[in-house]
Amino acid sequence: MKIEQIYTGCLAQGAYYITSDGEAAIIDPLRETQPYLDRLERDNVKLKYIFETHFHADFVSGHVDLSKETGAPIVYGPNAACEFDCISAKDGQEFKIGKVTIKVLHTPGHTMESTTFLLIDENGKDHAIFSGDTLFIGDVGRPDLAQKAAGMTQDQLAGILFHSLRDKIMTLNDDVIVYPAHGAGSACGKNMSKETVSTIGNQKATNYALRANMTEAEFIQEVTDGLLPPPAYFSMNVAMNKGGYESFETVLHNGMKAINAAEFEVVAEETGALILDTRSAADFHKGFIPQSINIGINGDFAPWVGTLIADVKQPIILVTTVGMEEETVTRLSRVGFDTIIGHLEGGFEAWQKAGFEIDTVNRITAEQFANEVNIETDKIVDIRKETEYAAEHIEDAYSKPLAYINDWVKDINPNEHFYLHCAGGYRSMIAASILQARGFRNFSEVEGGFGEISKTNLPKSDFVCQSKVLKA
């Protein structure tokens, strides 16, 4: 028996590959299937089952394509109403993979079909659970995402989750390994650890939601406290995971269409496509195609695309670093953005060489910012998360998280200059591109963000440990 966690950092997502005696199972696969097919061939094993812990909201799984390509059935837990062929397994049902067994533990609460898969080894011993979004390392799944589908309130779902954890998971032996679907950075929980593997015993000792003396009322209050609104694309991803989707190969083929500089603007206008520039903030601010939105590929790319563009059906035309086209299309497809028209042939350099109009962002260093800003009179906009701002910020700075830019942008006074920063410059350049695309140019974006600003002598609030803020 072999278990491999295939962790994708930009999505904070774990897929799992299990083999035993010539057979394999894959749990919660990513959208692109070729890496799995290559691995199966290399290991000379047959894919027997594809297990899905629930209908994912934050990414589009590869279950449908993988099943078509291998013939392996897709297995969900109870209550899964798929719009394609799948097995909606019963609680306690078992599936054999070589010499090991996967047992279905129905653990609703995050969603009503949420299921934990218990791996029983060849000796009949409980070895590990694949807990999906039911149990994370340091947290549990948020109970507010499935309210509409379940016809319940988040408190009711939280109550169901409380009993799932205590009746199905906490009764397992302490040495059972916990393999969750997500880690820190995912919007599917609020206080996940950076660790991606743990044990039942460790979680009983350290996870706030598994306290032995915790009442159901306390659990509901603590699990639902501080939940941020889910990104708008979540419901669309659920629909794709439940109903099926365009083949990844088709999406990739369309996205890999090269459009030369002379045709690029015409294609964008005719299709109503959003121009998405995925280069680094350092490159983008020096020059870009007017009206482009910058979300750098080397960051939390897919989640920010989903949060800020939201509509997965929005046509997109890409500007990437040359050679990064396929990677960019792949990452977009993982969160359901399949309407990719193509990409700029030769990248931004080709546009520049053709002599077309370019735009720039007014980016200043933290030192320059510190020298010219007047804390008492100048406006400073901090676009980090509320928890980051609460931990420490520049005195008198306004907290305006990037995730809510579509709400607070309407309050900007176009005649009042302001300074814009995040933690390191990635998010502030996203904000800068959105602001300029909407006609605002009355700001300076601070390179290096709060990380560099904190090294200056500017007055700051008292530091508060972020973990304490999150648990408060």
Image (cartoon, rainbow, N blue to C red):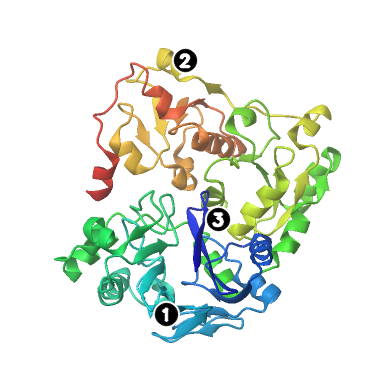
Q: Residue at x 67, y 65 (%)?
A: 37
**Residue 57 at least partly seen:** no
Marks 3/1: CA distance?
36 Å
Q: Is residue 371 above or below residue 139?
A: above
Q: Is residue 254 above or below residue 96?
A: above
Mark 2 touches mark 1? (CB < 8 Å): no
Q: Quadrant of residue 189?
A: bottom left
Q: Name the residue under label 3.
A: 310
Say which mark, if any, is on residue 103: 1
**Residue 316 at least partly seen:** yes
Percent from the top left, x then y, of residue 61?
A: 57, 66
Q: Name the residue under label 2.
A: 368
Say which mark, if any, is on residue 38: none
Instruction: Give the amino acid at mark 3.
Output: Ala
Q: The residue tagged with tag 3: helix, strand or loop?
A: loop
Name the front one of labels 2 and 1: 1
Residue nearest the viewer, comparing 118 with 166: 118
Q: Residue at x 34, y 76 (%)?
A: 152
Percent from the top left, x then y, of residue 330?
A: 66, 54
Name the front one of labels 3 and 1: 1
Percent from the top left, x then y, of residue 312?
A: 61, 59
Residue nearest the viewer, comparing 93 with 82: 93
Percent from the top left, x then y, of residue 239?
A: 55, 71
Mark 3 touches mark 2? (CB < 8 Å): no
Instruction: Give the amino acid at mark 2.
Output: Gln
Q: Quadrant of residue 77?
A: bottom left
Q: The residue tagged with tag 1: helix, strand or loop?
A: strand
Q: Residues within 10 Å of mark 2 (few under 14, many from 20)?
A: few
Residue nearest the viewer, comparing 339 with 48: 48
Marks 3/2: CA distance?
35 Å
- Which of the two labelled residues, at mark 3 and mark 2, occupies the earlier sequence position? 3
